Image: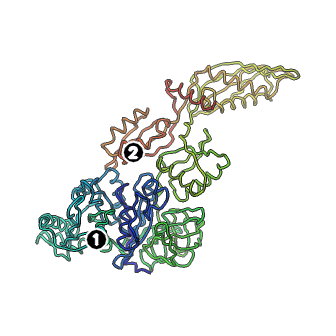
Amino acid sequence: MQEIQMIRNIGLFGHSKCGKTSLAEAMLFAAGKLGRLGKVDDGSSCLDFEPEEAAHHLSIGAAFNNLSWNKHSLLLTDTPGDDNFINDTYATAQVVDGAVFVIGAALGVKHQTEKFAALLPENHLPGLIFVNKMDRERADFVKAVDEINARLPLRAVAIQLPIGSEANFKGVVDLVRQEALLFDANTGKVKKGLVPNEMQAAVASHREKLMEMVAETDDALIEKFLEEGTLSDDELRQGLSRAVKEAKLYPALAGSATGNQGLAPLLDAIAELLPSPLERPAFLGTDPKTQAPSERQPSPEAPFSALVFKTITDPYAGRLSVLRVRSGRLTGDSFYNPNQETNEKFGQLLLLEGKVTKPVDQAGPGMIVAATKLKETLTGHTLCEAETPIIYPARPPLEPVISYAVTTSKQENEDKVFSSITRMREEDPTLRLTREPQTNEILLSGLGQLHLKVIGERIKRKFGVEMDLSLPKVPYRETIKGKARVQYRHKKQSGGRGQFADNWLEIEPMPRGGGYQFDDRIVGGVIPRQYIPAVDKGVQEAMTRGILAGYPVVDVRVGLVDGSFHNVDSSEMAFKISGAMAFKKGFMEASPILLEPVVSLDIKVPKECVGDVIGDLNSRRGKVMGMDSQGKLEVISAQAPLAEVIEYAPTLTALTAGRGQFRTEFSHYQEVPAHLVGAIVASSQAAREE
C-alpha cells in the first residue's frame, strides 16, 4: 500500500479542446505507464476509450488512470470540457486534492475558460497551470499568464519561461532553480543546461516578479523582501510550496502534450508542490443521528468514510460505483450507506485505468476506486462505518436545459428503450424522464442536444435498441372569451327503436384557471333526472378532444337550461351525443381562442451579453420582468411562451459564447396572438390527419 503522504490525487480541468486528455496521455507516457503516446484525434487515447468519445473527438465522462513518478503515486482524473458533459467535471472537483488547469498557448483565455477556472476557488483546490500547445502558431506563454491574471479568479505566476516559440519551442528556463531544461520530443527526456544569454534579462525580471508574488503570501517573507529586495533559494522554494498548497498562487508551466514536451517538469511540480491527502483540510458533513455538524480528518487512522461521485453502468458487468476515500481504510467487503440507512456488500474493489480495471484489496485516504455490485448506492451517497456514520454534502446534478420527445420506430422495443434510459439515469443524474399528461409524450431532458444524442448512441451500443428524438409538442389549450346559447336536437330513426335528445346549453368563460363547471338548471322535468349526467359527460368528452384545434378545452361554465325528450327513443347515449354536439356548436359561437403555456426564465449571462440576450427575448415574444447582479453576471428574470424557447439552449450558447446559463419553470397560460392561431390550427389538423 502506497504511503498516503506520497499520493497526489489530481484532476485535469479546462475548456473543450485545450488538450486535457492529450496531456494526461503524455503524462502516462512520460512516466512509462504507456508504451506509446495515444492521440485523441485518431481514437487511440487510452482515456477517451468509449466509442462515442472516439467518434466525437471529445471526453464525455471523467476517466481515471494512475502513474508512478519519483516514488509518488499520481492518481489522474481527466474531466470533460464540453458543456453537454460538464456535470462529471463538477463532481470531480469535489473529490480531488489538486488540479492541473490546462489552457491553450495560442487561444489563451476563452469565454468558457472562466467557468472551469471558477471550479478551483469554489472547491478550495490548489493547482498548477499548464500552458499547452506551445509549439503551435501564435503561441504566447507570457500573454496567456497575463490573461489568466486579468480575467480568471486564479493568481497565476510563471515559474518557467519558454525557450523558443511555435515550431522552435525546445525547452524552458526553470525560474526557481535558474537553469535551462531542454526537451527531446522523441523521448520526452530533459537535458539541463545554462540559461541562454539572450534570455538573462527576461529571466531576472520574471524571477523577481515570482519572488515578489511568493513574498506577498507570507508576512515574514514580505517583510524580508521589502528590506533586502530578494529571497534565498530555500525561502523561495518553501514559500512557493506553502502558497500553492494554500491555493494563494497557481504556478504556470509551459509545454506541448502532443509534442511530448514539458511533461517531466510538470510531473516534478505536481509531486513537489501539490498536497497529499494528509495535507488537505478536514471533510465536513452531518451526523445522520443527531443532524449535528461532523467532520473527518483525512487520516488512515480515522473511521472510514467515502463519497460516491460517479456511477458507471454496464449491461454485463453491472453497476460500478466510483468513490473517493476521504478517511480511514476500506477493507473487507461491506460498509454502511447512511443515505439509504442500509448495509451494502460489494463484490470487488477496482482501480480504474482507462477501460482496464485492476483489483485491489484495500484503499486509503485520497484513493479513487470503484466498488462492484452495490444495490442501493447511487451517485452522491456517502459510505462509512455504521458505528460512526456521517453524510457528506454532494453537489446536486445540473438542471436539464432541453427536452425532446422519446419514441421508437419499433413498438415492441418501447419498454426496452425506457428501461435502458432508466439504467442510463443511474450513470448520468442530469437526465430526466417525464410524461407530459396532455400530449401523452415521454420527454427526455438533458444538458444539450449533443448530450441527448450521445445518450441515444450509448443506449444503442449497450442495450441494442434505438430511440428516436423529436421536438415535443406544445401543450396548447382552448377556451372562449364570449357567451353563447345554443340548441342541439339529436334525432335518428333507422328502423326499430330510434334516438332522441334535445338540449339547450348556455356557455360562458370562467376566470383563467377556473376549470370546468356544469350547472343543472332544468326545471319542471323537461329532461328526466337520469339523463342529465349524460349531458355533462358528453360535454366533458368534447372538451377533452378539443374543438378549435384538437387541444383540451379549459375554463368554461356550461349550463343545461332547457330541452325535451321522447318516452321511447331517449336514452343516456342520445343525451351524451346531444350534449357533446351542443357544446361544440356553442363553443365556436362564443369567441374561441387558443391558450399557450408561458414559462419563467432565470438567465445568467455576462454583463456585456445582456443587450443581445434581451433583444433575442423580445424577438421571442418574451417579457423581461427584472434584473439583478451576481458578481460578474447579470441575472435576467423573464417570461416567454414555451413554443418560443423550446430550443433556447443552443441560442443562448451562441449569444454568450457558452457562458450563459438558464433554468425554466412553468408560469401560466396566456392567449395566443390572433395572427399565430391559423398556423397552429393548420399544423394540428395536419398532424391529426397524418
Per the rendering, the mark at residue 400 is none
Q: Secondary structure at mark 1?
A: helix
Dividing the picture into quadrants, the one containing residue 25 is: bottom left
Dividing the picture into quadrants, the one containing residue 522 is: top right
Q: Position of residue 42 (x, y in %)?
A: 42, 58
Q: Which color scheme is applied?
A: rainbow
Left or right: 140 in relation to 541: left
| Residue labelled with disc 2 | 653
Residue density around tag 2, few if under 14, some if 14–19, many if 20 or more, within 10 Å = some
Q: Secondary structure at mark 2?
A: helix
Q: Position of residue 168 (x, y in %)?
A: 22, 61
Per the rendering, the mark at residue 265 is 1
**Residue 296 seen in render:** yes
Q: Position of residue 599 (x, y in %)?
A: 48, 39
659 or 14, which lies in front? Answer: 14
Outermost residue toward the right in this view: 496
Tell me the kind of residue under disc 2.
Answer: Thr
Q: Position of residue 101 (x, y in %)?
A: 33, 61
609 or 354, which lies in front? Answer: 354
